[in-house]
Amino acid sequence: MRKLAALAAFVVAAAVVAAPPASAAPGDATVVPIQVTGDPAKRFNLVVLGDGYTAGEQAKFRENVDKHLNVLWTIEPFKSYRSYINVYAVSIVSAESGVDCDPNLDSPRVDTPLNMGLWGGCDPTSVRRLLTVDDAAANSYADLVPGTTSANRQLLAIGNSDTYGGAGGTYATATGGNALSALITPHELGHSLGDLQDEYDYLQRGVRGDPYTGGEPSSVHHTLLTEQQMLAQRKKWWRWLGEPSESGGLIGRYESGMYASSGVWRPSAHSMMKTLGYHYDQVERERMTQRISAKTNILADAVPASAPVGADRVLWVETMYPVSHQLDVTWTLDGASVARGTRNLNLSTLDLAPGRHSVTATVVDPTDFVRDPAVRASSALTRSRTWTVDTALTTPAAPVQPAFTNHTPTTRPVGGTDVVYAEPTHPADHVLPVLWRLDGRTVDPGGPGANDRAFDLEPLGLTGTHTLTATVGADTLTWTVDARQPTAAYQLSAPLVSGNGSYVYNGPFTMALAGADDTPGYVVREFRTDGDGWFNYFGWPTDPDAPWRFTPQGTEIDSLVYGKLGVPRLSPWDVVPTNYGTHTIEYRSIDAVGNVGAAAAFHVTLLPPAPACTRTITGRHEGPLTVRDGVTCLDGATVTGPVTVAAGAALVATGATIGGPVTATRAAAVELVRSTVSGPLTIAAATGDVHILGGTVGGAATVTGNAAPVIAGVTVRGPLTCAGNAAAPNDLGIANSVHGPVVGRCR
């Protein structure tokens, strides 16, 4: 136990461990405890191995690990069950930098301890993104972490590469430096830990998969059944049907998956196992909850039950503590309930009849992440211990020093909504109470019969920074409570016009998200569009420092589509509508201790692109201008006279100055963007788009008999009249300034 205690105490050193000395030889390894929540024998141990990082690149490896973990801790169920997990990084010195066959089959082979390589280990019949590792070598280095075994650990090997790649066999792999690398990790853990399947409709990118031809899949998140059949037969995800998916949309039945383009169905439109960036949906989350919990024993410790106990003693159990909630504990005496919630049962208070009795403590995880009764009843989420109580026995006196034996780590701040726990020693004849104080003030963890070994911070609604202590006897634990929300800020490319948190574009635009917090560690940023699933902001697939790019149909990169505004698409062959109109984009950030910042939002309107110019005028045009046919574009031009647009012709003016009135009758289109019209403006019976965005009209503006005009952010010096249009003019949330009367539907 001394060795384990020393290792647990070493957790504070995770952030300050120096890089291996310059004399470190290839193959040398250093175990760095990143997060130690308890005895490795009683925890799920995530062992992260680095490959292809030279002695001088070990700091880079730890930066990669920090980012991968901070992203992982924002994704349920890892977020809630973070406290079940010990994390150890094994920094391995590589002779050479990188991984094999990166990025191509003819790229050099490199000398690394784990022999990691893309293309399935340089196999020409494989795919580039498949990153393999030498299993035997990985295990040998993982064995350096004391107390971990193949049964209680999960290996994650991170290769020193900026190329997209990973794998999810027995051991998960991911590249370290790609923009999406930190999202590859939870996806591959979905395979390795959760036995989840890919939901792609392709195996080789750019090659659409064939229809599925097999029988009912064993996969928990794929089926051939209809929704009606799932409900009638109570199979697959019938318990979740119709609910909002954690990854966006509703849980239902969406075609394609398991590399097949059709003939098989999955629960969500998109999720972690289909599109990196989204969360696990409920079906996947339930499986992952079961698998994480199964790597531990939720009844972590208890009074031994190998022999009868006397009726004069206190029975106790110690449970696991998710960050998000407490486990239920019920006590029964001869089959009848006698207590609930408490982790202790004082038998002397039960007035037992002489003879033998049976006492059982049952621990159940009540998480909302699980709905399947079989999963709930499994050993992963339900454990019990039964004692035989003999009233003829007397418990020997054995003094026990009041102290804490296990607790939430005090070496880093806890989040403002966390459950913090502290387990004291266990005298046989009485219960040691735990005294909790917040900022020096005594606080009650829950009332009579409640579990005083844990304190749930969420109901307090804390803000700012606080100090929480737990005391038993002369032993006191102290935590810093970080209840400060991280912040997020956005920056957009230049719009056509903007105001009041609304922005207007008629083509691609970019969005950069920045996150900030005063707690060290990578700040995760997320956004979602029109209430769809929250999506991890990772920069741009080809450059993590570049902003996200939205387009009407998305941008194809390496045979995948990114940045489709509105209804998303992933594969180039996905047929989805071009979603012009106004969209709401929400954004937020999540800090290293799990605090989720308040979401804010802005609105973006995407208009169809302006018609292509057949004639472009720049500079100065003297006198009147008549647009008789085609599309005339005024690009920063100055027209000294009036402009007339004939029937069937189109005018597109951007940053232009027009020295007289503008008149258009039955025009094909009229678009005035940030332009100045010195006189009145009259647009009647246009057959196409009428867009007046920003700028100034020096006289009256009259818009009549058009389809659906847009007038946003415009200053009108005279009256504004709208009549006979098919739809009321839309200001897109950007108010106009009208100095004269407003007549008709313009009001």
Image: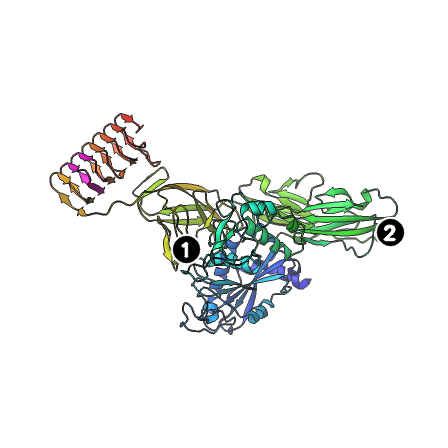
Q: Which mark is residue 393?
A: 2
Mark 1 belongs to which amino acid?
Ser
Task: Say whether residue 670 is visible.
Answer: yes
Give percent across and percent down for residue 483: 54, 44
Q: Which mark is residue 524?
A: none
Range of the magenta residues? Answer: 640-668
Which secondary structure lies at badge 2?
loop
Q: How packed is label 2: few (under 14 Cα within 10 Å), some, or many (20 or more)?
A: some
**For residue 557, above or below residue 663:** below
Task: Say whether residue 473 is visible.
Answer: no
Q: Quadrant of the C terminus?
A: top left
Mark 2 belongs to which amino acid?
Leu
204 in magenta: no
Left or right placement of residue 627 versus residue 608 in this view: left
**For residue 487, above or below residue 18:** above
* Residue occupying image coordinates x 78% and y 45%: 335
Q: Which of these two is toward me, 707 or 45?
A: 707
Q: Which residue is mark 1?
A: 571
Left or right placement of residue 250 versus residue 334 in this view: left
**For residue 152, above or below residue 22:** above
Quadrant of res 717: top left
* Residue occupying image coordinates x 82% and y 56%: 307
**For residue 642, above or below residue 60:** above
Q: Which of these two is toward me, 387 or 452?
A: 387
Which of the two marks, 2 or 1, is nearer to us in this view?
Answer: 1
Give percent across and percent down for residue 203: 46, 61
Mark earlier in primary sequence (2, 1): 2
Q: CA distance from mark 2 to mark 1?
A: 71 Å
Q: How packed is label 1: few (under 14 Cα within 10 Å), some, or many (20 or more)?
A: some
Left or right placement of residue 658 versus residue 501 in this view: left
